[in-house]
Image (spheres, rainbow, N blue to C red):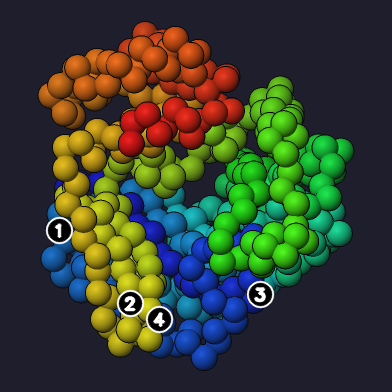
Amino acid sequence: MKDLSIYIHIPFCKEKCYYCDFLSFRRGEDYFEDYIKALLNEIDIFANTYKNIYKIKTIFIGGGTPSILPTGYIGKVMDKLFSCFFIEDDAECTIEANPGTLTYDKINHYKQNGINRISLGLQAYQNYILKNIGRIHTKEEFLKNYELIRKVGFNNVNVDIMFSLPNQTLEDFNYTINKIKSLDVEHISVYSLILEENTKFYDMYKKGEFVEVDEKLDRKFYHNAIDNLTNYGYNMYEISNFSKKGKECKHNIVYWERGEYVGFGLGASSLLEEKRIKNTENISEYIKGNNKKEIEELSLEDRQSEFMFLGLRMNKGISKHKFYDIFNQDIKDVYGKQIDRLILDKLIIEDGDNIKLSKKGLDLANTVFVEFI
Ligand code: SF4
């Protein structure tokens, strides 16, 4: 049996954060029941064809805010997955949660139903910043939820934090990092605020009410995070991700290493048999069972390009041998010019069998990725 990862999309949030352009709707309680029914149906249909071909390595329930669903729904989804697929004993099963939507019962319910990792969105440990970016919770609620998660017995927790937020100072950011360190979380994801269209911040920007942090300060935030977390012993294994030993997010590594995954739910994406597949983003259609999938067959060039720009996100970089094993071509025959130029510009380095981003390349990662697209 081949390895497969599963992504489940829950497209509901209590409120929309001001920076967020993810596919999610405010509230949506009226849709919960029908949405989960459609989701279970989609899983069944897929499993009918593929259950004997794949074994499940990781499950990731993301959104949106999966923890907005009342107790019981996640159990139904996990039951369906366990009944349809062979799920490995050590499969990593993550749920994303927003502080302010969790209760002891919900957390306990996740544990009883096979979830073994929780990813909590904190973003900042200052209430005034949380308010400025439209988060629905306070730092106190985060802390309370975090303690409940530990009390229930979860030993694999991620916390998301952000920098370059409006009015956020370096002191604020370092305080947030230090607070997370003191909680001894296993995994930390650190993201820079990106101004996206179709967000409240973008509307404010158009009206001149939002000013982006300048690049120099943005990089300073980033370097601070890297120094602070790596000096403390966290391993930076990807551009934005830090973990304790053995607690890297297995699910995300599947994305970066181009492993196969199937996405269930509204707008969910899959990479299967070298096709990129995307579900409809129309919730009424989805609920009717009409997934209307967009299917893109990946050419050899597409696959090689993805191998490069996804693999280079990881600190270990990409393996030249692996490239040859997969594509039966020498990496230098395909990307020799780009690699030589990026080495000359000190953006990437060759380290034995690996090619990876340099320190300078980490700051200019997009410039590097573009070379392979
Ligand atoms: S909770 Fe997450 S998915 Fe929902 S609006 Fe905020 S950032 Fe977006």
Question: Do callouts 2 and 4 mark residues in contact (Cβ within 8 Å)?
Answer: no
Say which amino acid is labelled 3.
Glu
Say which residue label 3 marks.
15
Q: Rate crowding at label 4 as few (under 14), some (14 to 19) or many (20 or more) other CA atoms within 10 Å.
A: some
Q: Identify the residue shown where x is 54% and y is 33%.
A: 239
Say which amino acid is labelled 1.
Asn
Residue 38 as seen in the image, left or right of residue 146: left
Instruction: Single out the mark in the foreground, 2 or 4.
Output: 4
Instruction: Single out the mark in the foreground, 3 or 1.
Output: 3
Q: Rate crowding at label 2 as few (under 14), some (14 to 19) or many (20 or more) other CA atoms within 10 Å.
A: some
Mark 3 / mark 2, whichever is N-terminal: 3
Residue 207: name its quadrant: bottom right
Question: Residues under labels 4 and 3: Cα distance?
Answer: 18 Å
**Residue at disc 2, secondary structure:** helix
Say which residue label 4 marks.
283
Task: Name the residue at the bottom extreme.
Answer: 30
Question: Do callouts 2 and 1 mark residues in contact (Cβ within 8 Å)?
Answer: no
Question: Residues under labels 2 and 1: Cα distance?
Answer: 18 Å
**Residue at disc 4, secondary structure:** helix
Question: Residues under labels 2 and 4: Cα distance?
Answer: 15 Å
Question: Residues under labels 1 and 4: Cα distance?
Answer: 30 Å
Across and down, in percent, residue 154 comes to: 60, 53
**Residue at disc 3, secondary structure:** loop
Residue 146 drawn above or below residue 82: above
Instruction: Single out the mark in the foreground, 1 or 4.
Output: 4
Residue 341 as seen in the image, left or right of residue 25: left
Across and down, in percent, residue 14 comes to: 64, 76
Say which residue label 2 marks.
40
Mark 3 / mark 1, whichever is N-terminal: 3
